[in-house]
Amino acid sequence: MAYEVKDIKLAPQGLKNIGWAEAQMGALLEVKERFEKERPLSGYRIGMALHVTKETAVLVRTLVAGGAEVAITSCNPLSTQDDAAAALASEGVNVFAYKGESTEDYYRFLDQVIDFKPQITIDDGMDLVTRVHTKYPQLLSDMICGCEETTTGVIRLRAMEEEGALKYPIIAVNDCQTKHLMDNYYGTGQSSLDGVIRATNLLISGKIVVVAGYGNCGKGVALRAKGLGANVIVTEIDSFRALQAKMDGYRVMKMEQAAREGDIFITVSGNLHAISSEHIRLMKDGAVLANSGHFDHEIDVAGLKQMASDVQRIRPLFDQYIVEGKRIYLCGEGRLVNLACAEGHPSMVMSLSFCDQSLGVEWGIHNREALEPKVYKLPQEIDQTVARLQLEAMRVSIDELTAEQKEYLSSWQTGT
């Protein structure tokens, strides 16, 4: 066992926080209990690049319970919870992560996970998969499968598949309903506003909040901002999503116009420079910028730094830039605001995502002979299983089809 963490003495507090997370993650604990009995992952090495949080620690425990050996690093320099990382190290997990990683350490830690020679990868954003393909191609022949957690990573994976560059099968966990319609929508919505509020202590009510992107993450952010009393503007490049936003009651316009009006800007586009330097020049004094997309280039942070005549950190991970005499504020250095400035998604919603990850690994192992180097969706029955486990954890009962109803749904003769 090897580890590099901020301070191993943080482990006792980390164990308490992991215990608190587990109390909210009943569905995943059901998977863990079955894994302990059946040991479906015995003999397999899993390399992980995820946000090293208390919730992720419960996923690691689940994989270990299934018999796997695990090495984990962070998928974002600012998302590690140092006490959770220390707790994992204290339990014998190979963990390499600390909050505020340098770029050098970030990639060195990825290499240390790869040195573990994983046969299975679990990734969030696809940096681990990319590094294996580009720097360690000799390991590709031993890879069984991988799982990808987030929208951004799946976009990159499909680009690799399209080019014929993908060399082992990857399961797009993000495409599960119990992931993208739960984690992305409910989790990102709540945790992004949580991050902005913790960073700024601003009152959201009465503010004009501009949401860049109206996918599942953007829908969640817009709804939570509206619920807190904000006047919400949505910017989009997709006609149907823009129409959805309009029909949901939001103002929809180009970012060039929204930049002049907004008080708080939150990017969830999955793309480059949803807020550009030119947009920033148009903003009013006191505008606050936050990103909740996976990578830190949704806001042109480099351009902001270049334009600024002065930069000061005025609160933890909350910086003031003076641009042409105006104060522009940036949360979390432009990285994931919900993890840089808060604690990420609530534990319950991560229970669903990590059920998908755990069962995805198991499915990949069981189907290894049939899988090709492509991007796969998990079967619908796994999605339904995860939803059922969560309902049971919430003590919710639902109806079942009667024999007559089943016959009706499988026939075509009965009409008006």
Image: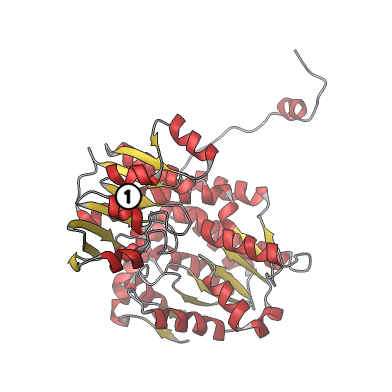
Relative to residue 259, is residue 246 drawn left or right?
Answer: right
Residue 92 position (above or below residue 313): below
**Image location (x, y in percent) of residue 29:** 49, 59
**Image location (x, y in percent) of residue 389:** 54, 49
**Image location (x, y in percent) of residue 132:** 60, 78
- Tell me which colouring the rendered structure shows: secondary structure
The amino acid type, in three-letter code, at marker 1 is Phe
Relative to residue 284, is residue 300 drawn left or right?
Answer: right
Residue 114 seen anywhere in this rendered image of the structure:
yes
The residue wearing badge 1 is 265
Mark 1 Cα shell of 10 Å, populated few (<14), some (14-19), many (≥20): many
Query: Front-most of 45 and 390?
Result: 45
Given the current orientation, which residue lies at the most extreme top position? Answer: 416
Q: Quadrant of the C terminus?
A: top right
Residue at the image point whose x is 52% and y is 59% from the top: 152
Residue 40 position (above or below residue 353): below
Given the current orientation, which residue lies at the most extreme right position? Answer: 413
Residue 187 position (above or below residue 166): above
